[in-house]
């Protein structure tokens, strides 16, 4: 996003607060996988999930992970799943709470296609290194750090890991991923390439909320699918306000994609015109269920500072549809509206300084010593307190499970955000107790692929057909 956004008028803090309550609603389309009509037709630039957590093996750093291009069937050749070369992929950081980025990590791509007129193959033999001559389709990237008045190139012509086209083509994809992980100035590192989708859940929520009796559960709908992943690990001092994570430990994180308009001619698409934001993601599950189809595209085009501009969305959040559905189908009373507990969790962050019902100071930028409260603008983003110690025994239910390092204080790969948010929407954050009737959730409590113990932590991409499982 342009750094000039820092000069924009902060609008509608109270009205904008309601938007973030949408993040408490369980997914109907696997977080942000194909959540809005327009972006569903452009999967290469569709954000799916964002994660932010203190690196467990390097606690002086934070790892940020953002995924795009969901629901990748591993055998989907011959073109597989390239990054868009006419788009900007952004990871944004807001340390002072004004709802516009203080830092943006921006990734742009170029393609080196060596297939020409000779073959349709992605690779014409086993690929044992990222520079193997058998790899015919390659993508390179640049990484820029954008700050007010300054842009710094961190990586120039980095190599993205290719799609994993199968075990014969990539006998050791872990080695390829290691080669695609590179150091960046300042003590960080970055990985660009495919991974197994880290999000785990049962998507049969569409069938009367798991069959109307919670019997349609225990099936990981995303098992075996891959995504395109950007993972970056940087020192906390690079992200904190004034470079001081002790005084200012809380940051807000969201990803977005900006794309140029395409002019379509027979056999050709030509980018033209200015870049426009077409996708956005902070907390999981914001745009999937709360908004009607008519306003989903508008939300994807909004920046956090403009959340209050879609009144139709605010009206729906004030009376969450999902809470009423749960009441109608399962007989669990919907909490009284307006939902100030969800507003605090997902918009202001949890803090005693915002006047909300949760009497704790956890993950609001208002808790940063050097933040000007007059400039604070409630807005939808994933908030992380970088000073929260790494949990020795992480609880999949995060803060609701007594683990203060878990979601909604950032988001780890192992956090079961669907079960957390089901509990939140039926009032567990108000009472401090799980609702027993929904305590088992969708019974998909962990990812099917093991996460790694070191950066980039995500699972290796699958190379088996989804229907083989």
Image (tube, grey):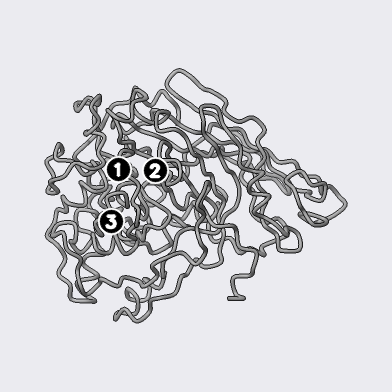
Density class for disc 2 (Cα within 10 Å; few <14, some 14-19, many ≥20) is many
Does 382 sit above or below residue 123? Answer: above
Q: Is residue 38 left or right of residue 82?
A: left
Q: Position of residue 348 (x, y in %)?
A: 23, 41
Mark 1 or 3, closer to the camera:
1
Residue topped by disc 1: 388
The first of marks 3 and 2 along the sequence is: 3
Q: Is residue 23 left or right of residue 88?
A: left
In the picture, the disc for residue 24 is 3
User: Which residue is at a point 63% across and 49% down the rendered structure image?
Assistant: 177
Please say if the residues under marks 2 and 1 sit with CB atoms less than 8 Å apart.
Answer: yes
Q: CA distance from mark 2 to mark 1?
A: 8 Å
Q: Position of residue 92 (x, y in %)?
A: 42, 36
Residue topped by disc 2: 54
Density class for disc 3 (Cα within 10 Å; few <14, some 14-19, many ≥20) is many
Does 307 sit above or below residue 374? Answer: below
Mark 3 or 2, closer to the camera:
2
């Amino acid at each position: 996003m342009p750094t000039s956004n820092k000069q924009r008028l902060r609008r509608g803090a109270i009205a904008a607060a309601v938007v973030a309550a949408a993040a408490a609603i369980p997914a109907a389309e696997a977080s942000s996988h194909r959540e809005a009509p327009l972006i569903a037709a452009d999967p290469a630039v569709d954000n799916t999930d964002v994660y932010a957590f203190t690196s467990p093996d390097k606690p002086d750093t934070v790892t940020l992970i953002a995924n795009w291009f969901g629901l990748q069937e591993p055998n989907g050749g011959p073109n597989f799943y390239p990054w868009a070369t006419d788009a900007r992929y952004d990871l944004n950081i807001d340390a002072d709470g004004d709802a516009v980025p203080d830092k943006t990590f921006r990734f742009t791509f170029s393609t080196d296609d060596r297939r020409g007129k000779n073959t349709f193959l992605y690779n014409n033999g086993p690929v044992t290194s990222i520079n193997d001559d058998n790899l015919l389709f390659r993508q390179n990237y640049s990484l820029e750090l954008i700050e007010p008045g300054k842009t710094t190139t961190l990586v120039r012509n980095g190599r993205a890991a290719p799609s994993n086209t199968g075990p014969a083509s990539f006998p050791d994809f872990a080695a390829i991923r290691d080669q695609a992980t590179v150091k960046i100035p300042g003590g960080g590192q970055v990985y660009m390439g495919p991974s197994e989708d880290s999000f785990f859940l049962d998507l049969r929520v569409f069938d009367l909320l798991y069959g109307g009796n919670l019997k349609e559960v225990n099936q990981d709908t995303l098992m075996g699918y891959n995504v395109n992943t950007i993972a970056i690990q940087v020192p906390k001092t690079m992200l904190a306000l004034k470079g001081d994570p002790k005084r200012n430990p809380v940051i807000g994180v969201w990803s977005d994609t900006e794309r140029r308009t395409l002019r379509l001619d027979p056999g050709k698409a030509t980018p033209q015109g200015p870049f426009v934001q077409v996708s956005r993601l902070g907390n999981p599950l914001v745009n999937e269920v709360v908004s009607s189809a008519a306003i989903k595209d508008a939300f994807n085009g909004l920046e956090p500072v403009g959340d209050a501009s879609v009144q139709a969305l605010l009206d729906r959040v004030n009376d969450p549809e999902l809470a009423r559905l749960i009441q109608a189908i399962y007989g669990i009373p919907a909490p009284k509206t307006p939902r100030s507990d969800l507003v605090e969790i997902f918009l202001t962050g949890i803090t005693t300084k915002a006047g909300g019902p949760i009497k704790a100071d956890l993950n609001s930028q208002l808790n940063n010593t050097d933040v000007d409260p007059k400039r604070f603008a409630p807005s939808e983003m994933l908030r992380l307190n970088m000073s929260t110690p790494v949990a020795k025994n992480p609880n999949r239910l995060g803060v609701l499970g007594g683990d203060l390092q878990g979601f909604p204080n950032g988001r780890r790969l192992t956090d079961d955000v669907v079960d957390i948010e089901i509990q939140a929407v039926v009032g567990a954050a108000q009472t401090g107790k799980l609702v027993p009737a929904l305590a088992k959730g969708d019974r998909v409590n962990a990812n099917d692929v093991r996460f790694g113990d070191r950066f980039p932590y995500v699972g290796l991409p699958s190379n088996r057909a989804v229907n083989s499982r």
